[in-house]
Image (spheres, helix red, strand yellow):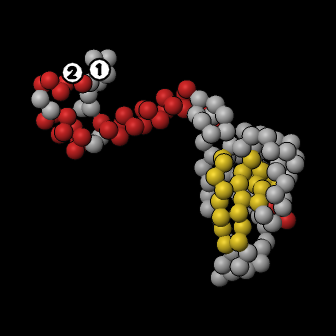
Amino acid sequence: MRIIYIVGNHPALGDLVPNKVAMYDDGTHGDQRAGDKVWSYTATFPRGTRLSYIYTNSGTEGRWDGLDLQRVRDFTVDGETTTIYAPIESFGRIYMHADNWHPDPSGYDLIARGVLGALRDNGRLKRYLDALPASGAAMVPPDRERPQ
């Protein structure tokens, strides 16, 4: 990942101009430790400010190239503390995106493995499958394992 940017509805967040306000992973600008894959940005807002923002991943300033994380986040500055740490985000791996909204094949494989693992760990599903009559076993394709 080259750079993560934050863009939002306030001048300190770029006033909706994408790829203008960089976040940092170099031990500066509020970032506590360089190279730890925790991207940080420090800004000051008046109490009661309602912010909406997203993250972009290294496009041209002023141009909406691709978005790594499309979900719009909302945050209201409550003013009850002098320092507020906005929610920490987790940025997945870019290789899992075929486009802005869909995983590529490796992403679908990762999702399928996660679902299969959850199903295997589900005792209720296992009891249900074990209770199926022998003819029910034919519904499971022969090249697939039944949850253990």
Q: From the viewer's perspective, is 98 left or right of 3?
A: left
Is residue 31 or residue 86 the one in the foreground? 86
Is residue 65 or residue 42 the one in the foreground? 65
Whether residue 8 is visible: yes
Q: Residue 32 placed where, x, y %?
A: 71, 58
List the single residue furthest toward the top: 143
At a point 72% along the width and 59% down the height, the residue shown is: 53
At a point 27% along the width and 32% down the height, the residue shown is: 147
Report how far apart the C-alphas of labels 1 and 2 lie in the structure: 7 Å
In the picture, residue 78 is in which quadrant? bottom right
The residue at which mark 2 appears reads as 138
The three-letter code of the residue at mark 2 reads Ala
Is residue 110 or residue 98 the one in the foreground? 98
The vertical placement of 82 against 57, above or below, is: below
The residue at which mark 1 appears reads as 141
- So how many labels did they put on this image? 2
List the single residue furthest toward the right: 61
Q: Residue 8 placed where, x, y %?
A: 77, 60
At a point 71% along the width and 44% down the height, the residue shown is: 67
The vertical placement of 145 against 56, above or below, is: above
Which quadrant of the figure contains the N terminus? top right
Secondary structure of the residue carrying numbered label 2: helix
Secondary structure of the residue carrying numbered label 1: loop
